[in-house]
Amino acid sequence: MTDAFAFVDLQAQRRRLGDALDRAIERVLARGDFIMGKEVGLLEARLAEFCGARHAVTCASGTDALLLILLAQGVGPGDAVFVPAFGFVATAEAAPRVGATPVFVDVRPDTLNMDAASLERAIAEASRLGLRPRLVLPVDIFGQPADYPALQAVADRHGLSLAADAAQSFGAHLDGRPVGKLAPHTAVSFFPAKPLGCYGDGGAVLTDDDALAERIRSLRLHGKGKHKYDNTRIGLNSRLDTLQAAILLEKLAIFPEEIEARDRIARRYADGLADVVELPALGDGIRSVWAQFAVFVSERERIIAHLAERGIPTMVHYPIPLHLQAGYRDFPVAPGGAPQAERRCRSVLSLPMHPYLEEERQDRVIAALREAVIRNPAD
Ligand SMILES: *Cc1c(COP(=O)(O)O)cnc(C)c1O
């Protein structure tokens, strides 16, 4: 067996950043402003500038970024929040966390992003159940922005607000417009393995809406009013640590180059694999950040084992659709169900993807997957 390697190699990036990261951390340690310190404000300005949003408000995680958007809009009991059935549980979690009801929408079989026709049916179903349709919450799965023009049109037709779960897609574009400008409000995550990750938990809300940004700045600090002990609303403790902001500032400086590298690797994978496995489609005008590079295979367990024997790590994002998770089974699903989400959960497989994955390793992944699939002509 050849050497095994990492699915996401954070140490390769650390080596590249060299002592810049250590110095950034030491500056915070020397000052001691660990909570809402200098780098938090600096990072917010840089994030806003990076994507062209008027406001970037940092918080403790991507999960909290979603929660803060719902709290700031007063989403609560009786409200329906429309979420895709394929993805990570945090998207579905936000609605019940504020007493609202998640309603699951099927995804498109090609991009795995929210399907506008299923959304239409889900909105009708929510009304039929006596819920108040409130918010559409698409996910930019694997780093590819959802079809915002189509989804926004549905939301507008029904008078609903729309927010993006861009936990996987900060840095991506649709028709030249960056994530952060594709939806009125956008949640991002800085979990270490995301395309732009820190060394712990972190997140942010991006918006052009002055009033919403102001409410979120208050909510993340216990509903702060004019000063620390003036509390004008029920908030929570959801701040990004100054240390994490300092780390993110260093990483943001090299992020554009890292996005280029991810794109090069994705193209090399696609060139080497498109004739033997089905790949998710990239929509027109999309620039993905490739949080994951996914393929669809039959006999997934056998393929995972074949790659593992050759030292190649894989992951399954995601094995169980959200509407079938034990904690979420009782919430409504669009009429017709979510058959595409269910089908794709059975065949989807993620290959190693990070900006420092060497060509030799990319070629090993391609060769091993080709070998595994061709051995079984059913794929
Ligand atoms: C990672 C992720 C989240 C949650 O982000 P955290 O920072 O881990 O809380 C939410 N939604 C999606 C789609 C994610 O991939």
Image (cartoon, rainbow, N blue to C red):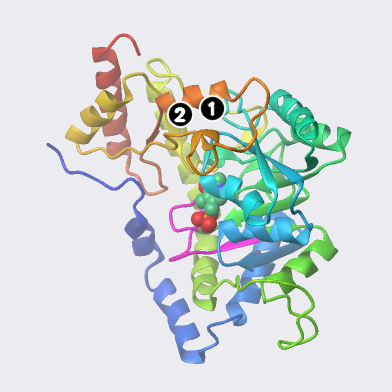
> Does the magenta-highlighted stretch encompass residue 15?
no
Residue 74: image quadrant is bottom right
Q: Residue furthest left?
A: 1
- Closest to the observer: 293 or 358? 293
Main SS category, magenta section: loop
Magenta stretch bounds = 191-204
Q: Is residue 160 visible?
A: yes
Q: CA distance from mark 1 to mark 2?
A: 6 Å
Q: Which residue is mark 1?
A: 341
Mark 2 neighbour density, 10 Å: few (under 14) some (14–19) many (20 or more)? some
Q: Is mark 2 within 8 Å of ligand 1?
A: no
User: Residue 354: x and y, percent?
Assistant: 40, 47
Q: Residue at x 36, y 57 (%)?
A: 10
Identified by mark 2, the residue type is Cys
> Does the magenta-highlighted stretch encompass residue 203?
yes
User: Residue 352: x and y, percent?
Assistant: 35, 40
Task: Check residue 213 in the rendering and tell me which mark sits there, or answer none.
Answer: none
Task: Check residue 345 in the rendering and tell me which mark sits there, or answer none.
Answer: 2
Q: Which quadrant holds the N terminus?
A: top left
Q: Left or right: where does residue 128 sit relative to residue 99? A: right
Q: Left or right: where does residue 336 sit relative to residue 370? A: right
Identified by mark 1, the residue type is Ala
User: Residue 370: x and y, percent?
Assistant: 30, 20
Residue 111: image quadrant is top right
Q: Residue at x 28, y 14 (%)?
A: 374
